[in-house]
Amino acid sequence: MKVYKALTIAGSDSGGGAGIQADLKTFQELGAFGMSVVTAVTAQNTLGVQGVYPIPIAGITEQIAAIGDDLGTDALKTGMLFSSEVIDAVSEKIDHYGWHNVVVDPVMVAKGGAKLLQDEAIRALIEKLIPLATVITPNIPEAELLTNRDINTLEERKEAAKSIYNMGAKTVVIKGGHGNGQEVVDLFYDGEVFEKMVSPRIETRHTHGTGCTFSAAISAELAKGKEIREAVMTGKQFIRAAIEKQLGIGKGHGPTNHWAYNERG
Ligand SMILES: Nc1ncnc2c1ncn2[C@@H]1O[C@H](COP(=O)(O)OP(=O)(O)OP(=O)(O)O)[C@@H](O)[C@H]1O
Ligand SMILES: Cc1ncc(CO)c(N)n1
């Protein structure tokens, strides 16, 4: 049996809906062997983030080396990286091991407003990590911070996608979960064509970890050798099912349902 390996370099969410926990559940459901590098531990649940405890840089680089020197990986995603020092170290290691199929989810702020990336780290993201990205998946506020401009119209979103593409990412997907209207539009751009990936907006407050799950699904598909566009389409189907059949747990913004895509829950 061919084993497809996928790695997540991200923060831990004790509540299990986002971060490392969401990524590993998604990898498992999509048939990839999941591995993880924890960059920070968060005390977090459906009500918000109560604490952030960054892992020292050596602890992060040793975890990456443990994987790079032994198992290797077919794809990886990055999530919460927290500081420019972590971004520098992670980018250097990705380069060192020559890892391909890199999905960058430029996590900046949790839905409740807690900071998951320090302001000054945006520069490191642009200079070090984005040039290594096969796919980058900013939401609209993240795309605004990366490009330093407001995004209100589709035209402005296209301009932002071009500008992020010009920072060195091979493919840009600007997610539309934060918009409003009947439809959710994710804008896909590969340097040649723009494609609007449209799905009905599901009315729910249970959207904790949607971005993590979406980028993890793309990574699992890339690990299995799927083309980028196809991987993104599957990511969208995976997150749609997970939101539609949300679990209804927790007192606040609940997690999505990682079993739903395979119709197991
Ligand atoms: N209400 C919704 N209905 C349908 N699809 C949604 C909804 N909200 C988000 N999505 C989809 O989920 C994916 C993630 O988008 P979103 O913009 O929510 O990411 P995010 O803000 O990075 O998430 P988070 O930071 O909470 O993990 C996208 O593919 C988006 O289309
Ligand atoms: C650990 C972690 N990573 C990412 C997000 C963004 O949803 C979150 N809330 N927590």
Image (cartoon, helix red, strand yellow):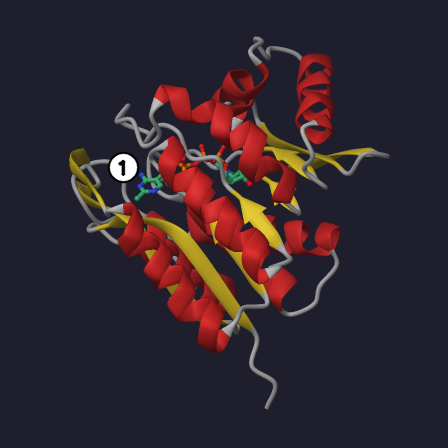
Q: Is there any visible trace of residue 25 in the rendered image?
A: no
Above or below — where is 254 with respect to 20?
above
Residue at 47% x, 65% y is 27
Q: Is residue 222 left or right of residue 177?
A: right
For label 1, the residue is 253
The amino acid type, in three-letter code, at marker 1 is His
Where is the N terminus found, in terms of image quarters? Answer: bottom right
Above or below — where is 164 with respect to 172?
above
Residue at 39% x, 20% y is 120
Q: Is there any visible trace of residue 168 in the rendered image?
A: yes
Q: Is residue 163 left or right of residue 242?
A: right
Above or below — where is 114 with respect to 150?
below
Image location (x, y in percent) of residue 213:
45, 50
Image location (x, y in percent) of residue 222:
64, 61
Quick one: which residue is furthest to the right in this view? 192
Residue at 27% x, 43% y is 254
Which image quadrant is residue 259 in? bottom left
Quick one: which residue is furthest to the bottom in this view? 1
Disc 1 C-beta below 8 A from ligand 1: no
Residue at 81% x, 34% y is 191
Q: Residues within 10 Å of mark 1 (few under 14, many from 20)?
A: many
Where is the C terminus found, in terms of image quarters? Answer: bottom left
- Badge 1 element: loop
In depth, the one of 251 and 137 nearer the eye is 137
Image location (x, y in percent) of residue 90:
45, 47
The total of numbered circles placed on residues is 1
- Tell which quarter ligand 2 is in: top left
Which image quadrant is residue 146 in? top right
Q: Is residue 50 left or right of residue 206?
A: left
Image location (x, y in percent) of residue 260:
45, 61
In depth, the one of 169 and 230 nearer the eye is 169
In depth, the one of 245 and 236 nearer the eye is 236
